[in-house]
Amino acid sequence: MIDWKENNVPYSAEFNDIYFSVEDGLAESKAVFLDGINAPDVWTGKKEFTIFELGFGTGLNFFNCLKLWLSHSDEEQTLHYMATELHPLTGEEIEKAVQWPELSEYLKAFLVNYPSPEMTLFDGRVKFKLLKGDSGSELSKTNAIVDAWFLDGFAPSKNADMWSDKIFKEMARLSNQGSKVATFTAAGFVRRGLNDVGFTMSKRPGYGRKREMLNGVYQGA
């Protein structure tokens, strides 16, 4: 069940946390995740590129990424976007939350297919898969090779299951040498946990009211 804050920002009563910034969720998404993995440069020259998001939520990061991908890739490149979500929102809730006009084209294309968990969009240039369930369990059943991770669960202090050693180990299993990771949190145990499984994590300036956040690269065990 979700409630709504100012500017139609969805809020989870279960986790006592908002889905994205009440000031500007779109700018936050770019600053944290797209800038955090150095997009679009990170996929330049790659025929296939896979992003895995933990915590799909409203789909805001996907739509924002989709916009950048379609304007900064060629027709021979394919984006594979996978995401986990334990509590999927309805199409109506997603539409209410994602109100930025510049995303309307991508939102519409998605909602035509939703709630189908798999869809091919924009003449095959984007392939999407939503894994409905607990992130740790879904990751353990996955065999994809992931080029970039978006860690976007609710805050670690409110949703610890999304930030466990089990998940970090699964991320390492599915990563390439050089796979990127970006997240809004700067929690010490998250940084240490990812470092322990082979990611080299760094702090960088946070977005908005957050002082710091993390990004990193997988260097191998």
Image: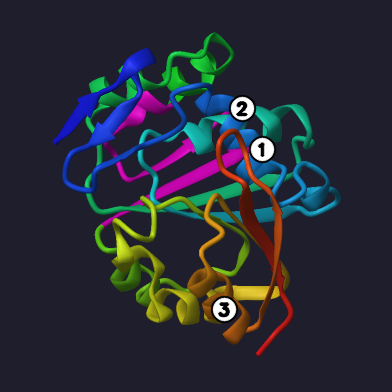
- Which percent across, then down, holds residue 165? 42, 80
Q: CA distance from mark 1 to mark 2?
A: 6 Å
- Residue lying farthest top? 101
Which residue position is annotated with label 3?
192
Q: Under tag 3, what secondary structure?
A: helix
The CA distance from mark 3 to mark 2 is 27 Å
The residue stretch that appears in magenta: 110-132
> Residue shown at 37%/36% (left/top)?
19
Q: Residue at x 19, y 32 (%)?
A: 2
Q: Is residue 65 visible?
A: no
User: Where in the figure is residue 139, as x and y percent of width and height?
Assistant: 39, 70
Q: Split into 4 quadrants, where in the image is the N terminus?
A: top left
* Residue 70 occupies quadrant: top right
Image position of 121 (left or right of 56): right
Real-space Cα distance between discs 3 and 1? Answer: 22 Å
- Name the residue rendered at 65%, 83% in the picture: 198
Q: Residues within 10 Å of mark 2 (few under 14, many from 20)?
A: few
Is residue 221 shown left or right of residue 45?
left
Q: Which residue is disc 1 drawn over?
A: 31
Q: Residue furthest left?
A: 1
Q: Nearer the viewer, residue 147 or 75?
A: 147
The residue nearer to you, when weighing 185 against 146, is 185
Secondary structure state at the residue bearing disc 1: helix
Dot placed on the residue nearer the N-terminal end, 3 or 1? 1
Residue 27 numbered tag = 2
Q: Is residue 64 visible?
A: yes
Looking at the picture, which amino acid does disc 2 mark? Ala
Choose the circle earlier in sequence order: 3 or 2: 2
Assess whether mark 2 and mark 1 are in contact (beta carbons under 8 angstroms). Answer: yes
